[in-house]
Image (cartoon, rainbow, N blue to C red):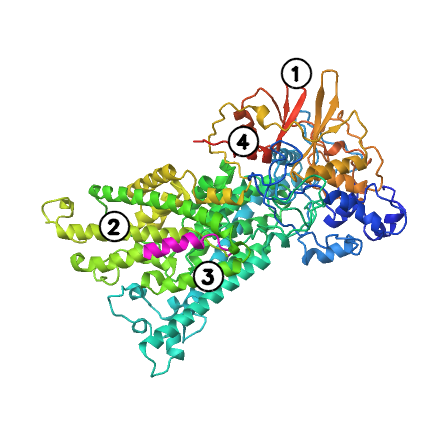
Amino acid sequence: MIPRTSSNSNLSDLNPQPSGPLSGPSDTTWRRRRLLSIGGDQSGDNNSNADERAPFARYNSLPHNNSYGTLSPQIGGSPTRSTFRSIRRFPSIGIRIPGALTGPSSPQISPTASTFRRSYFTNQRPISAYDAPLLEPQGAAPDAVPDVRTNGIRVWYSSYSSVDWLHDAIKDSVRRFRLRKRGSLRGRLRNRVDRSVGWIIVTIVGFLSAVVAFMIVRSEQWLFGFKEGYCTTGWWKAERFCCPGFDDTLIVTPYFAANSQSEVCKHWRTWADVFAKGGNSELGVDLLTYLMYAGIALTWAIVSSLLTIHLTASNSFATRKDSGVLGPSFADEGEVKGPNTVQPPHKRRVMYYAAGSGIPEIKTILSGFVIHGYLGGRTLFTKAVGLALSVASGLSLGKEGPFVHIASCIGNIVSRFFVKYETNEGKRREILSAASAAGVAVAFGAPIGGVLFSLEEVSYFFPPKVMWRSFFCAMIAAITLRFLDPFGTGKLVLFQVTYDKDWHAQELLFFLVLGVFGGVYGAWFSKLNYRWSKNVRNKTWLKTHPVAEVILVTAITTMFAFINPYTKIGGTELVYKLFEECKPGNHSGLCILDPTTQAVPVINALLVALVVKGVLTVITFGIKVPAGIFIPTLGVGACAGRIMGILVQWMQAKSTPDSGYFTFCRGDLDCVVPGLYAMVGAAATLSGVTRTTVSLAVIMFELTDTLTYAVPVMLSVLVAKTVADALEPKGIYDLVIDLNQLPYLDCKHVYLWGDNTVSDVTDRDADTIRLDEDNTVKSLRDQLLSLVSVEEDGGFPILRQTEGGLRMLGYIGANELEHALSIVADEADAIVAFHTTSAYGHDAYGTSSISSLTEEEAANGRVIGSDPFDFSIYMDKAPLTVQDNSPLELVQEFFAKLGARYVVVTDSDGHYEGVIDKKGWLAFIRTLGEKH
């Protein structure tokens, strides 16, 4: 054990240190206290003010920066380094450190083993071992494969850091090698079980995703109907299930037709029937109906917003895997005045995990970014409950997009019960890709489209094995949802329709026009929503009053809801009615008998609904409630398509049967299907907003149960994407990523490098560890504090001076150095060693990424890293290197295809020149103007 001084003896007795270099993460406050006390006066009382304040004053004098983003324009002050690593002024995101040390009056005690077990189910999620080393029995020969060299131990991934894909791939190869080499019956059985774990997980994820989707849909239906009344045969019944054989066709009857809801369902009692007196005027009844509708809608929206804000704020999540040296308060952008300025406490910007659709964040996570808590149980609960409430409030948003986030939460939670995926971030993202497919499958009843959506829009790494499992997961989700029957119609989704008439070649012109409309709308919607969020939501009083924004938007929405029936009904029901085919005998509402006399009123009503829905969606998407963009966009596109279909019917009615453009109808007034136009318009508009193509077309095929309309849908989707890309190169999800400055490296874009070279992005001033100098515990601590003040996801190149220059010997990450220093913090002046002679193979620790070995476990196996001052096991002794005369495209491939966290730059003689980390690379490519 490491000797302890008297000043820490009492604390040490209650809170034992980690058992060694391979121990799991200790409490963040304990690590912070240990690191910041290095070099202080360790004699006397443990509560000495001088002892406590000195290290904090040293640390707080640094310009801090903590974020989850990439590059944003630098504001105020000048960083200590003039490189891409140092100029990144990310928007700060709060990370709560439980009981964060604020002064000598608040001493922190790290939990003992028993208290940690008690807190397992309380305030922190359980801490598991990331790819814990496989111990060999004492005396056994260690495994070693000379052809496979490891790249050091990884302790944990902190929030807002990048995944080391190469390291995770190596350690999974080691794990599989250990399993495959066992020739015994038990070994073969374990091998088969290991191969089946992935299929077991995706089965559970698909099943649970469908169950959660069923509960959300049923809850949303009841909550939405409760704004207007309740069912007398059972208060828990939604309006759809109140009356057997209930047909809601008349709900969407235009204002020029007189039909009352009570004529349709006798068991449904409105609030006007409950509270209105017999002598009340019609105006009084209407006012009462509106007040009840608006009051309940505001209640649902406010509750959803409060749940989102208070349960999923980023500063309410904390794990032991967060950095212990990142303090609870930092200077915000523009407040950094200099390296010696003491920064006052400042309220940090907060990210709300359950807000929005979650797809941009899921894309970022699947690209190799860690956000602790974003896919956790608390976020899952809040997203599910808040989504049902926000959609039921009548806001112009949908629940289909957030299903991807919900399914990903389920995939993350389930995978953590299996060590194979819990201890490997790279492997876990395979499950998340499959879960994303299941989310789309339950949203649209389209399992094949879900797989393609995960491949086209969400996933970053999608090998064939992941595709098969994604397909299986989506199939399980679709089958389960079919058995649960959330709408009581036997269909997976409400707007699943079938058409019994074919389309005609002459109609391609109209489909082309709908494609152009979808592209124009998608581009301008993306632009307007981005500008609204950037210039209004983030630069006015709305930024600090998110609940007030929700109340304001909900109030405006309820005001416009009573313009006509199409603005009042829910988004899913509206899409369903617009998609519906007009069959013989069904000529009410959207189905008209005489286009020449009835077309204009219907078109006017739909046009008003289109404008209202479009404008409301612009200001609604981005408020602090769970909200999707699919259904509102489909609704706008379906309105436009239905208008086009009715206009075509009107033109056909005006033309003679045997002449003109409509000779293909041969006098049949029902040969034009307005519902088909609505579906084509919806597909085009959604493609213009999200820029999805293949997956969207397949989703539409699955919604119609036929490939008959493949050509119209494909044509409109392709035209919409082409037009939208010409007007605005980025879709809504990419713009949200830019707005939130998420570190997403898009591997699909081709960048134009111009005359830029590797030297332009190389950080030549990066702090390094020199082996030709004495590296003490205190000096390394000071270097660590200096690093995290400008880069929380970095590390240190380890160099040695030679005759020709500096030679690169290895690399150690900030988390690994923090963990190692916290173990030896009592010996501030002790020399730390880095050895480069040993080459790691498939041994017991070379591929670890967090170990939770206890002293007892270490005693039963091989003791690894017996010298706590030898940090060699944390070194990456084979980092990716690139010469300074290499093309930038090679560096892009390293980060995008190999998933590197950092690349070391050398000259042509192999001497060290600098380092490029992933966030520095992201900051660089954001400065490139033109790309195609």
Mark 3 → mark 2, Cα distance in angstroms: 33 Å
Position of the N terminus, as image quadrant, is: top right
- Image: magenta residue range: 609-624
Q: Measure the C-alpha gap from mark 4 to mark 3.
A: 45 Å
Name the quadrant of the C terminus. top left
Q: CA distance from mark 3 to mark 1?
A: 64 Å
What element does badge 2 sit on?
A: helix
Quote the CA–CA distance across marks 2 and 4: 45 Å
Magenta stretch containing residue 15, yes or no?
A: no
- Front disc: 4 or 3: 3
Read off the residue under disc 2. Answer: 644
Quadrant position of residue 915: top right
Determine the CA span between mark 4 and mark 1: 26 Å
Residue 654 on image: x %, y %: 13, 52
What label sits on residue 287 in the rendered view?
none
Question: Which quadrant holds residue 759?
Answer: top right
| Kind of residue sitting beneath label 2 | Met
Of the two numbered discs 4 and 1 on the same chain, state the one appearing first in sequence.
4
Residue 373 in the image, given as x and y percentages of width and height: 60, 51
**Viewer-nearest residue: 719 or 315:** 315
Amino acid type shown at disc 4: Lys
Q: How packed is label 4: few (under 14 Cα within 10 Å), some, or many (20 or more)? A: few
Could you tell which of marks 3 and 2 lies nearer the N-terminus? 3
Q: Residues within 10 Å of mark 1 (few under 14, many from 20)?
A: few
**Left-right relation of 644 to 444:** left
Q: Which residue position holds label 3?
A: 552
Residue 897 got which mark?
4
Q: Is residue 18 in view? A: no
Where is residue 160 drawn, in percent x and y?
61, 43
Instruction: Tell me where residue 151 appears, x and y as whole percent.
Output: 68, 31
Which residue is drawn at the image coordinates 51% and 56% (left, top)?
A: 542
| Comparing labels 3 and 2, the label whose residue is closer to the camera | 3
